[in-house]
Amino acid sequence: MKKTNIKWLIKIILISLAASVVFTLASTEILGNTGYIISFIVLALFIIVGIVFDVIGIAVTAGNEAPFNSMATRRQRGAAESLRLIKNANKVTCYCNDVIGDVTGIVSGTTAALIAAKLMDGFNTESLIFPVVISAVVTGVTVGGKAVGKTLAFNKSTEIVHSAGRILSYLKIMPFSNQDKQEKPDKLDKQEKPDKPDKQDKQSE
């Protein structure tokens, strides 16, 4: 395995761990000090974030560079950022679908379990109706939302990627900007060196 692949793997693992810890701590802290309405809002936010990033990841994979090249020549906002996303589709998909999407899915399940336990404690019951119903609703909404989002991502990939690029532009974030610096030395190394004159040519001269 190449060093770049090992570094990328370690980076993804660390980001996943950090995101999981932050989301879990945030949900636990919020749910411990709020009522039922805020708890369900937090749960809905986790589900929505997971679906949105899943849609972005799929849209970037399905996207085409051609319309963004045209936008870039007209200097439209977000065109350069959108091109970066599409040119690094594998990494974007890993971030959006595998890291954010999967982490929010796990955290939303944990949040649903905490809400169910809170309801059982509030109603002073040991019935499994709360965890079963909440888990079923969360699963249905997540799976259904991602199914609808996948269709939308394939049909509206250009619009979705451009929207993501515009947001990055407003935030002044250029994705994968360090990649060019890393690729330039590699390209220079791969360039063929000029052939040395053969001995026979020297002798003939």
Image: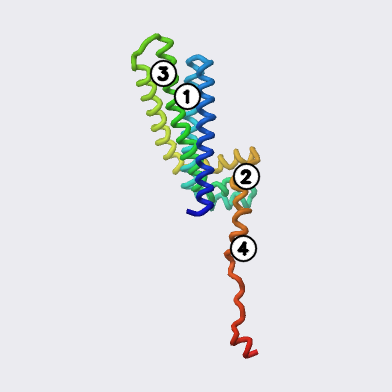
Real-space Cα separation, disc 4 to disc 1, in angstroms: 50 Å
Of callouts 3 and 2, which one flags the residue occurring earlier in the amino acid sequence?
3
CB atoms of marks 3 and 2 within 8 Å: no
Residue at image position (45%, 27%) is 108
Residue at image position (54%, 25%) is 26
Real-space Cα separation, disc 1 to disc 3, in angstroms: 12 Å
Real-space Cα separation, disc 2 to disc 1, in angstroms: 30 Å
Residue 6 in picture, x, y percent from top left = 51, 49
* Residue ID for mark 4: 188
Real-space Cα separation, disc 2 to disc 4, in angstroms: 24 Å
Of callouts 4 and 1, which one flags the residue occurring earlier in the amino acid sequence?
1
* Residue ID for mark 2: 174
* Residue ID for mark 3: 116
Q: Residues within 10 Å of mark 1 (few under 14, many from 20)?
A: many
Q: Amino acid at mark 3?
A: Ala
Assign the C terminus to one quadrant of the image. Answer: bottom right
Of callouts 1 and 3, which one flags the residue occurring earlier in the amino acid sequence?
1
* Residue ID for mark 1: 43
Q: Amino acid at mark 1?
A: Leu
Q: Residues within 10 Å of mark 2 (few under 14, many from 20)?
A: some
